[in-house]
Image: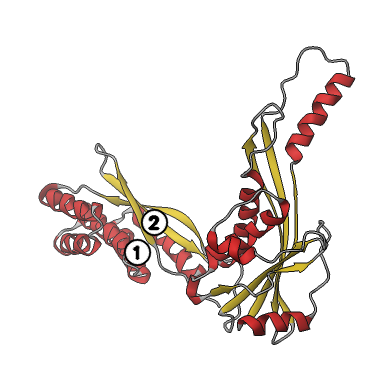
């Protein structure tokens, strides 16, 4: 399900009281790294990461929908699915659903199981009226930083080091998760992906054990990392503009800039357009540059480029030249 991302979000305007410049920060979306096929609207999800001994209950849907958090490895793996549900259900019309049997037998280790039998995939999708099946194929956790710290202490003792070595006060949880998304109609794998997540926590108590929330939180982050591949990320850009003019247009520039401070960009555009039409020289160049910024904020990128070019070509404003090059690049990549 591919979507063209060209919109932006206005974040904040920052100014310096003793400068003729102001600037605005804009938040732009990056396209997702992965897209769903157009026909995928409903996705069933199951947990196949457990060993046969662990796979004796099927209440993952209840724990996810009620927001319960537990500390066991078995239920921690369900936090991966909870993250997928929280972040993706309802996004762009996508529905995440749970079949009656939400846990399937897997390896229970870091060994990824073979592809699920297509008959089972079809049965699960038919039972939930889902277009695809997302499976957490493998989940494994470790507290590698704590083990490393203990080993370092032991090596120091064996080497004859003196003095008291403080026990480690932090632990880094490590969760490895492997996902597959199945297309039952075409019998193909839409996506497969392995993620490794690390979160660091302060230990507590005399035994320096990880806090109860360490494993579930790291597992939840692993689920987020996977599903974020289908969601847009964001980056910030800075656009300079003029808040001051010269001579008769000095107060008019200030009025236009004040409108931009409260996100009245249409009003600011009208003020700067009036200056551009009535002035010449530096005032006109500055007004054209501000008009370019206003147009970009308002989603008129081509018009913004035209004003930026005019600022430099007609009035020699170097900010206009630099801004025009930025806008040309943006238009080309979109």
Measured from the top left, where is residue 244 in percent x and y?
A: 21, 47
Nearer the observer: mark 2 or 1; the answer is 2
Residue indicated by mark 2 = 26
Q: How many marks?
A: 2
Relative to 228, is 104 on the left or the right?
A: right
Front residue (pair 186, 293):
186
Q: Position of residue 118 (x, y in %)?
A: 77, 82
**Extreme residue in the bottom direction:** 185
Left or right: 103 as drawn, with respect to 252: right
The kind of secondary structure element at disc 1 is helix
Residue toward you, 125 or 250 = 125
Estimate how packed mark 2 is, as few (under 14), some (14 to 19) or many (20 or more) residues with alpha carbons within 10 Å. Answer: some
Determine whether label 2 and label 1 are within 8 Å by CB: yes
Residue that protrudes farthest toward the left in the picture: 248
Q: Position of residue 287 (x, y in %)?
A: 23, 57
Q: On the picture, is 311 further left or further right than 110?
A: left
**How far apart are labels 2 and 1 at the CA level?**
9 Å
Relative depth, front residue between 99 and 324: 99
Q: Which residue is mark 1?
A: 296
Question: Which residue: 82% across, 67% down?
Answer: 113
Q: Quadrant of residue 180?
A: bottom right
Judge by depth and name the residue closer to the eye, 64 or 331. Answer: 64
User: The N terminus is located in which quarter?
Assistant: bottom right
Depicted 99 relative to depicted 175: above or below: below
Q: Neighbour class for label 1 at 10 Å: few (<14), some, many (≥20)?
A: many
What element does badge 2 sit on?
strand
């Amino acid at each position: 399900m591919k979507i063209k991302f060209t919109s932006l979000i206005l974040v904040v305007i920052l100014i310096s009281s003793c400068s003729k410049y102001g600037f605005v920060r804009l938040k732009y979306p990056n396209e997702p790294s992965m897209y769903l096929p157009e026909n995928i609207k409903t996705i069933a999800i199951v947990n196949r990461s457990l060993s046969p001994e662990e796979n004796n209950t099927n209440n993952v849907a209840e724990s996810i929908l009620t927001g319960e958090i537990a500390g066991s490895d078995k239920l921690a793996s369900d936090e991966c699915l909870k993250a997928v549900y929280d972040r993706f259900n309802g996004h762009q019309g996508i529905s995440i659903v749970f079949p009656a049997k939400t846990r399937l037998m897997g390896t229970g280790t870091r060994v990824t199981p073979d592809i699920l039998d297509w008959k089972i995939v079809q049965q699960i999708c038919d039972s939930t009226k889902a277009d695809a099946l997302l499976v957490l194929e493998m989940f494994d956790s470790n507290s590698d930083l704590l083990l490393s710290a203990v080993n370092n202490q032991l090596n120091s003792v064996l080497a004859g080091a003196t003095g008291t070595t403080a026990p480690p006060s932090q632990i880094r949880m490590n969760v490895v998760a492997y996902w597959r998304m199945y297309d039952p109609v075409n019998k193909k794998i839409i996506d497969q992906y392995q993620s490794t997540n690390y979160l660091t926590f302060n230990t507590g108590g005399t035994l320096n054990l990880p806090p109860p929330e360490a494993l579930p939180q790291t597992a939840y982050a692993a689920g987020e990392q996977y599903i974020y591949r289908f969601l847009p990320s964001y980056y910030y850009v800075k656009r300079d503009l003029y808040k001051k003019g010269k001579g008769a247009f000095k107060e008019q520039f200030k009025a236009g800039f004040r409108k931009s401070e409260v996100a009245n960009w249409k009003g600011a555009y009208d003020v700067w357009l009036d200056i551009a039409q009535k002035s010449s020289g530096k005032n006109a160049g500055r007004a054209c540059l501000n008009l370019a910024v206003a147009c970009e904020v308002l989603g008129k990128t081509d018009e913004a480029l035209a004003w930026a070019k005019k600022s430099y070509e007609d009035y020699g404003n170097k900010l206009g030249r630099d801004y025009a090059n930025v806008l040309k690049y943006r238009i080309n990549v979109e």
